[in-house]
Amino acid sequence: MNEIPSVAVKIKEIIDETPTIKTFVFDREFEFSAGQFCMVWILGVDEIPMGLSSSDSITVQKVGDATSKLFMMKPGDKLGIKAPLGNGFSPGKKVLAIAGGVGAAPLRPLAQKGQCDTFLLGCRNRSELLYEKELSELTNLHIATDDGSYGHHGFVTDLMGDIDLKSFDTICVCGPEIMMAGVLKVLNEAGIAKRGQFSLVRYMKCGVGICGSCCLDPDGLRVCRDGPVFFGDILLKSSEFSKYSRDASGRKVSASNVH
Amino acid sequence: MNEIPSVAVKIKEIIDETPTIKTFVFDREFEFSAGQFCMVWILGVDEIPMGLSSSDSITVQKVGDATSKLFMMKPGDKLGIKAPLGNGFSPGKKVLAIAGGVGAAPLRPLAQKGQCDTFLLGCRNRSELLYEKELSELTNLHIATDDGSYGHHGFVTDLMGDIDLKSFDTICVCGPEIMMAGVLKVLNEAGIAKRGQFSLVRYMKCGVGICGSCCLDPDGLRVCRDGPVFFGDILLKSSEFSKYSRDASGRKVSASNVH
Amino acid sequence: MVTLIREDNITAGGILMDNHLILAAGILGTTGASLNRMLSNGAGAVVTKSIGPSPKEGHKGPCVYVMDGAVLNAMGLPNPSSDFIEELNVLKDKPVIASIFGADPDEFHEVASWFKGKVRGFELNVSCPHAQGYGAQIGCNPGLVLECTRAVSRTGLPVWVKLTPNVTDIKESGIAAERGGASAVVAINTLKAMRISTDLRRPVLGNLTGGLSGPAIFPVALRCVFELYKALNIPVIGCGGVSSADNVIEMMMAGASAVEIGSAVLDRNDIFEKIAGDLYSEEGEKASDIIGCAHE
Amino acid sequence: MVTLIREDNITAGGILMDNHLILAAGILGTTGASLNRMLSNGAGAVVTKSIGPSPKEGHKGPCVYVMDGAVLNAMGLPNPSSDFIEELNVLKDKPVIASIFGADPDEFHEVASWFKGKVRGFELNVSCPHAQGYGAQIGCNPGLVLECTRAVSRTGLPVWVKLTPNVTDIKESGIAAERGGASAVVAINTLKAMRISTDLRRPVLGNLTGGLSGPAIFPVALRCVFELYKALNIPVIGCGGVSSADNVIEMMMAGASAVEIGSAVLDRNDIFEKIAGDLYSEEGEKASDIIGCAHE
Ligand SMILES: Cc1cc2nc3c(=O)[nH]c(=O)nc-3n(C[C@H](O)[C@H](O)[C@H](O)COP(=O)(O)OP(=O)(O)OC[C@H]3O[C@@H](n4cnc5c(N)ncnc54)[C@H](O)[C@@H]3O)c2cc1C
Ligand SMILES: Cc1cc2nc3c(=O)[nH]c(=O)nc-3n(C[C@H](O)[C@H](O)[C@H](O)COP(=O)(O)OP(=O)(O)OC[C@H]3O[C@@H](n4cnc5c(N)ncnc54)[C@H](O)[C@@H]3O)c2cc1C
Ligand SMILES: Cc1cc2nc3c(=O)[nH]c(=O)nc-3n(C[C@H](O)[C@H](O)[C@H](O)COP(=O)(O)O)c2cc1C
Ligand SMILES: Cc1cc2nc3c(=O)[nH]c(=O)nc-3n(C[C@H](O)[C@H](O)[C@H](O)COP(=O)(O)O)c2cc1C
Ligand code: FES
Ligand code: FES
């Protein structure tokens, strides 16, 4: 086995993206491909998985202990980063990205690398919109808000009707699992489930593929090592996707609690 | 640190060289340069250092427990060999080899590789003569016996007077330490101590340079790792060479007990 | 290389398995699907994540630190407790061993009772080096080891006792397990260890110290197997740092009847297939001729 | 990388040395010349081969087995006993620590008495894992550790006690040493371990089992230093698997006041020069700010 070091980084800049989301920029870059993630060690608190939102940043939604501690940090503070981990997206020629909420984070590098043609971005309301300016410059950006405060009033899946899905070789998706299930359903109906690539979230204790806390039913695929990105046809066969996940102890939690 | 494996070899052939010396031929070859040695693990008994007398053999004089056990072995029996160890000879263009007794063993590969012009071989009596036929074919061989039963009657050092020492770029020497001291004295008087390369024997416990049992005074050079071959000018400065050595416990033993 | 001939009905410590290679406890053993995957990938039997009397979330991260040739972990025995039983539904009639833990003989017995009819046997975790009140805190007390073993033996299923190397004399723990009615001992669990990030000036594990596994501990595991084989009459299952077929043979020569593999799954997920492929051959020897042969 | 600033008068456990790097006992420590060479090659102090009450030839070979990143040895404490004293003549006024062993407090005291006026202090070997009646057989008995330490303390010279990790709780041994008057504890000696040649079907050491050293044991050594630093008031000297300047810093962060280096001499004979070159710099921090800082 080869070392997976926890590299010390300094926070160089903290960007307020939305009232609940911040981007933390590090003082060093990591080689990675879009969709790969890192384990972020918040000293004295916990180590948590985060998608790389660029070669030197993570974009974090505050949801609990560790993310709250992160939100209290200041430029100059240090973190330990294990990166890159897992398998990212495999973008084809023409790529459609579909994001819900902070799910835009791991998709953003596709846009930055010029690998994304069209971007469908959904969120609760206008203030929760992530990377709008950047994405509008780099991609053909379509927006939907749950409350209609901006763009299309409704779900991001609605936007899929407006575009020629079949013209895309790859559809990269990240967001709440119920939203991703909706996307997969549309793709499946269009007969192109295989073109869909979905970035999943499961409770990760080790992040490197040894502990088993992130395994998916029914094949035992590890989200941290075999994923986090899975092809649509694989997920169609999953008895777990969009139905349940497991918590830190390994007990099942139904999908309504899955963000 | 890199592994130094104890390679299992089968004894393929046992050659009776003299009444007290046998050559054990292995079923596998080792890359080495003349003068390098191996640690021979005689199962259940001990592990002892032996010069490589060719890429697949050692030539052993029976002197004690381990060598006696070796003498009882038969073709097909197994040994563990760590090889090659230490630093061998660095032969120049024209090489003179001077051997006393079983000291011919580590010098023999020089002859086999065509790197040896002249070979002075000394031993107790005719029956103790080692490799005579082979060496006479490969080199310009001169022989001396202590009892005069063959060749020159006297010491091998006497033979040095018969040849043009200064015509040799390198003089490779192995034999009892008192004999090697004699050779070094002659070389030094001729002003060419530096051309002499001497293969030393010291009590070795590890053979790999970590335990310190084989260190030479006054510089602490390790015979197993920095040697076993040392240049004449280094040995001229040695307070230990030809005077004493140390036994298994590290106590000094005077040179009369050094073989 | 020395190889084994494939034999039918391989049993070790009273448990029938498909080959001599067993997935170690706590490695990809949290779900039935994952255990099933390891069986499909060539494991001859699998040990579950250690299950205890009540659900545990485990320690805060970092929980695992991977080094060159070694792994450090302090998971803190996260487990879903009795909820785990339903994971076994997909493993019917498969060679599954339940790893269990508790704070005392009663807890061990209670947890064991959930598994009756669902597994081929038990492995008692009395050896985890980083779980307050559990694991090694029991394992270093031979009296408690004996009592816990006896409590689970009452189930009638084979009981393996997994020992900690973090004791002055592992043979004492082994003898206690044997006296308590164990069918086998498993040696070893992890070595108590730690690393510090010099850049961050902090231990790299959330729990500060943890357990060392992987190739680095193989020589220690081998020594424990060797000592236990000599001291006990029940079989010894080797565990610790095994990452090749030759390591398996070496463990068996030291006295192991079968071998558990954990950290090596980091190298490749199909490590069991790979090792089994190298381990068995037509010209192989009988396992019984290899087991303990280094004692001559 | 974190570095140290070169300071004058570096002392640890009452012993003045030239830098924080010490040659470990039994490594190239059989002769005065060899110890001298290691000092010239950059060691800040040297520990001698362990010297006992009567000459010993040690175990039959093989005595050492070198693996990738680890060394196994069973030398069997070969030593010339009192004959060793004359080896120290070439080491006058140099930072030399005598490693000594005995079977009981009286033997320890007797051996220590030979060294008065010749060394800066003692290191008691109560930790060698493969010497019948000596070493770890004393080290795992806290009462004996205390008595032996007290016996040598009577010489008035600083006494370091080198501890074995092959015990259930190394803190107990450390506390015993502290009570006995030790100036420091050294952690750790080797881990009890073995390897078997599968081709030859035999343990690779003449003594069957031996002691594991080198990088593989670094995480165990670090944990021991960390635990002892927390439990004791006397300084801890780190030892075990150190092979780089960053390892030295890591040991010091765990609580080591200085660090011993053994097996790494296999990589390069000038390992002390190399590590010291990397360890010290103009922009370095004070050692006192680094020692124990991982305890925050
Ligand atoms: C591959 C991957 C990529 C991710 N990328 C991002 C990202 O780019 N931006 C972002 O904001 N979030 C991301 N997440 C989710 C993020 O890991 C959790 O929000 C975070 O761990 C919550 O930690 P907490 O201590 O603040 O919350 P807690 O108080 O611990 O719990 C809040 C919720 O977070 C989830 N959670 C907690 N710890 C973990 C863990 N170790 N692994 C997975 N989920 C956990 C739990 O399901 C829980 O319901 C990603 C998760 C995964 C698995
Ligand atoms: C680099 C080197 C190359 C050698 N090459 C040869 C060779 O090619 N042929 C040959 O016959 N002999 C060679 N020897 C000497 C050989 O190692 C000893 O004769 C042998 O170890 C004796 O072992 P024993 O058990 O039979 O003798 P013992 O009964 O142990 O003792 C007999 C004598 O052998 C010496 N000896 C014993 N063990 C060792 C040891 N571990 N290291 C060094 N000396 C030891 C002792 O000084 C002792 O006086 C070499 C020695 C060295 C150091
Ligand atoms: C991440 C991880 C989790 C583990 N969890 C458990 C556990 O729950 N119960 C247990 O008995 N051992 C557990 N272990 C120890 C392993 O089962 C095994 O004894 C140890 O890792 C040595 O084997 P290896 O070197 O092949 O990994 C765990 C080890 C690791 C690395
Ligand atoms: C060949 C060898 C001989 C040793 N001899 C001794 C000894 O005589 N006394 C002692 O206290 N420790 C002895 N040790 C242990 C070392 O001093 C040290 O504690 C151990 O090797 C761990 O450090 P390292 O990993 O840097 O080698 C020996 C170690 C080796 C490898
Ligand atoms: S988080 Fe441990 S296996 Fe995925
Ligand atoms: S024999 Fe050990 S150093 Fe030379």
Image (cartoon, coloured by chain):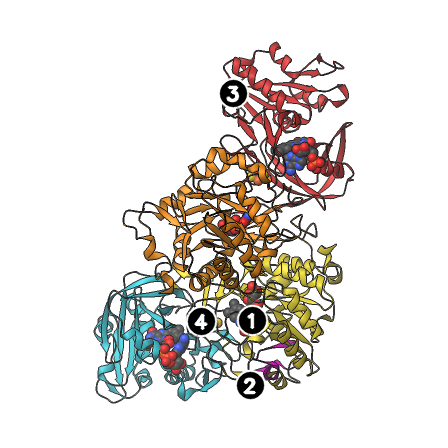
Chain colours: A red, B cyan, C orange, D yellow
How far apart, in angstroms, are the residues tagged by discs 4 and 1?
A: 29 Å
Would residue D243 appear left or right of C239 to someone viewing this image?
A: right
Callout 2: residue from which chain?
D
Would residue C232 appear left or right of A5 to someone viewing this image?
A: left
- Which label belongs to residue D136? 1
> Where is residue D159, by image quadrant?
bottom right
> Label 1 is placed on what type of residue?
Ala
Q: Secondary structure at mark 4?
A: loop
Viewport quadrant of the C terminus of chain C: bottom left
- Which label belongs to residue B31? none
Nearer-the-camera pick, D199 or D174: D174
Q: Position of residue D280 (x, y in %)?
A: 68, 61
Residue at point 69% right, 13% down? A154
How far apart, in angstroms, are the residues tagged by discs 1 and 3?
A: 64 Å
**Which residue is denoted by mark 3 in the rendering?**
A195
Q: Position of residue C37 (x, y in %)?
A: 46, 36
Q: Secondary structure at mark 1?
A: helix
- Residue D100 located within the stretch drawn in magenta: yes
Callout 3: residue from which chain?
A
How far apart, in angstroms, are the residues tagged by discs 2 and 3?
A: 80 Å
Q: Does the rendering let one see residue C130?
A: yes
Callout 4: residue from which chain?
B
Q: Are marks 4 and 1 on the same chain?
A: no
